[in-house]
Amino acid sequence: MVRGLKVYIDEDHVGSVARGSSSDFNVSPGTHKLYVKMDWCSSQPVVINLDKDEEVPFLAKPPGNNSVAVLFKPLFGRIFNFNDFCDLKEISLGK
């Protein structure tokens, strides 16, 4: 997978993230819905509650490692569940 993932916050496309890179997005304090998308496939949405000046890092993990089972995930995901294309998880900054 060489194309980037489109990032959506509250249904608005706010930018993209290329594989192996990171991006920052400014978001107002409050409750927001975050998800990533490629073509017609997307991640499950994640609801986040942000305080003023809070940073919340997420990792989007699209299918595509060396596991044989993972190689078939995009195919089955496209056929059976378009909204579970990749995993989107909050990660700890270790603070």
Image (cartoon, grey):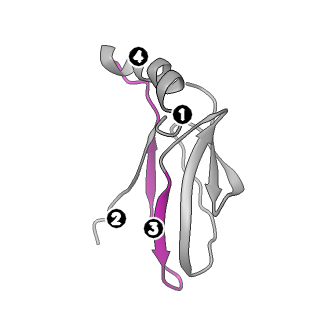
Query: Which-is-in-front pick, marks 1 and 4?
Result: 1
Tell which residue pokes out farthest to the bottom in this image: 52
Earlier residue among tags 1 and 4: 4
- Residue at the spot of label 2: 93
Q: Can residue 56 be found in the magenta stretch?
A: yes
Question: Circle 4 sits on which residue?
Answer: 72
The residue indicated by pointer 3 is 56
Q: Which residue is mark 1?
A: 82
Q: Earlier in the sequence, mark 3 or mark 2?
A: 3
User: Horizontally, is 55 left or right of 26 in the view?
Assistant: left
- The extreme left residue here reads 94
Q: Is residue 81 above or below residue 14?
A: above
At label 3, which amino acid type do we have? Val
x and y, in percent, of residue 76 in the image:
45, 20
What's the residue type where badge 2 is placed? Leu
Horizontal side, residue 26 vs residue 44: left or right:
right
Is 21 rendered above or below residue 27?
above
Sequence-first tag of 2 and 4:
4
Q: Please indicate, yes or no, whether residue 55 appears anywhere in the rendered image.
A: no
**SS state under label 4:** helix
Q: Which numbered disc, 3 or 2, marks the residue closer to the eye?
A: 3
CA distance for labels 3 and 2: 8 Å
Amino acid at dot 4: Phe
Q: Element type at marker 3?
A: loop
Residues at marks 1 and 4, CA–CA distance in whole angstroms: 14 Å
Most foreground residue, 29 or 33: 33
Q: Give the crowd class for mark 3: few <14, some 14-19, many >=20 residues within 10 Å.
A: some
The quarter of the picture where residue 27 lies is bottom right
Q: Callout 1 environment at 10 Å: few (<14), some (14 to 19), or many (20+)?
A: some
- Residue 65 is at least partly visible in this image: yes
CA gap, disc 1 and disc 3 = 26 Å
For residue 58, side relative to residue 94 (left or right): right
